Image: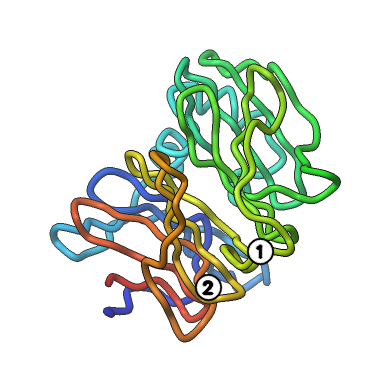
């Protein structure tokens, strides 16, 4: 593995050709200012970008309207569904759906049996998420406003405190804090398998142009 960034970066966002991130810097007056960067995976270098480039990549075409309404743009996850809706989900369970014009069509809390859901992996009109306290992966429908499927449970060992999920084609990749593994779920038959194992908790996995990246507690790495 090749270490690319230290652990203090925030807002890690996969994009075509690489990823964006925010580097917090403390100013002489004690305030913290975020500087925006884009990492070019082909050329192995990071270059400064504007916050508007970052916002558009994260929130879609209606980024100006959406960012004017949200409580913060860093800690939320966002996925764009078929139809152009932007789904925003915060670590505390705050949840919002915005249409293609940036108008909020739903805001509230997203929970599963009283437990917080993390992760937004778009899949048509649905999205996949994880429930860390229940060792589960769920599929949520924004049209039906309910969880349509659950894989895993507190009693099962398929997932151990899953913290994030991403979908590539017919496969989900789930990062597990407890087992320190990235595990896969085939959406063809829902079979679960090991994919990667680390010596520390794995927080995020993504792939760009046949290159794979992970965020561990110690930083961001290219595999």
**Label 1 Cα neighbours within 10 Å, binned few <14 / some 14-19 / many ≥20:** few
Residue at left offset 55%, top offset 28%: 126
Q: State which quarter of the image contains the C terminus.
A: bottom left
Q: CA distance from mark 1 to mark 2?
A: 33 Å
Q: Nearer the viewer, residue 45 or 157?
A: 157
Colouring scheme, one of rainbow, by chain, secondary structure, one colour: rainbow
Give the camera-side residue of 111 and 26: 111
Question: Do the residues bearing badges 1 and 2 touch, measured as CB atoms within 8 Å?
Answer: no
The residue carrying pointer 2 sits among few (fewer than 14), some (14 to 19) or many (20 or more) residues within 10 Å by Cα, namely few
Total labels drawn: 2
The N terminus lies in quadrant = bottom left
Q: Residue at x 73, y 58 (%)?
A: 134
* Residue 138: percent from left, percent from top: 62, 43
Q: Nearer the viewer, mark 1 or mark 2?
A: 1
The image's mark for residue 8 is 2
- Label 1 sits on residue: 156
Residue 94 as seen in the image, left or right of residue 169: right
Q: Outermost residue toward the left?
A: 43
Q: Secondary structure at mark 1?
A: loop
**Looking at the picture, how far across and down is residue 124, in whole percent?**
46, 24
Residue depicted at 48% across the width and 81% down the height: 218
For residue 103, side relative to residue 92 (left or right): left
Nearest the camera: 148 or 71? 148
> Residue 121 at what x, y percent from top left?
49, 41
On screen, 157 above or below 79? below
What residue sits 58% from the left and 63% below the top? 159
Could you say where residue 166 lies in the image, as x and y percent from the top left? 45, 48
Query: Going from the N terminus, do you reach mark 1 or mark 2 first?
Result: 2
> What SS does tag 2 mark?
loop
Answer left or right for 133 relative to 156.
right
């Amino acid at each position: 593995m090749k270490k690319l960034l230290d652990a203090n970066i925030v807002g890690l966002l996969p994009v075509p050709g690489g990823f964006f991130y925010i580097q917090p810097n403390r100013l002489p007056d004690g305030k913290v200012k975020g500087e925006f960067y884009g990492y070019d995976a082909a050329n192995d270098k990071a270059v400064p970008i504007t916050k508007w480039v970052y916002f558009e990549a994260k929130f879609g075409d209606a980024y100006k309207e959406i960012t004017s309404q949200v409580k913060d743009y860093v800690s939320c996850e966002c996925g764009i569904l078929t139809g152009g809706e932007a789904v925003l989900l915060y670590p505390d369970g705050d949840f919002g759906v915005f249409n293609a014009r940036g108008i909020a069509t739903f805001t509230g809390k997203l929970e599963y049996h009283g437990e917080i859901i993390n992760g937004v992996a778009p899949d048509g009109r649905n999205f996949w998420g994880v429930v860390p306290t229940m060792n589960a992966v769920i599929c949520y429908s924004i049209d039906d406003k309910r969880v349509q499927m659950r894989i895993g449970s507190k009693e099962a060992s398929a997932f151990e405190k899953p913290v994030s999920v991403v979908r590539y084609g017919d496969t989900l990749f789930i990062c597990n804090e407890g087992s320190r593994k990235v595990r896969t779920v085939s959406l063809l038959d829902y079979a679960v398998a090991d994919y990667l194992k680390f010596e520390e908790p794995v927080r995020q996995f993504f792939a760009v142009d046949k290159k794979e990246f992970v965020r561990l507690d110690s930083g961001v790495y290219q595999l």
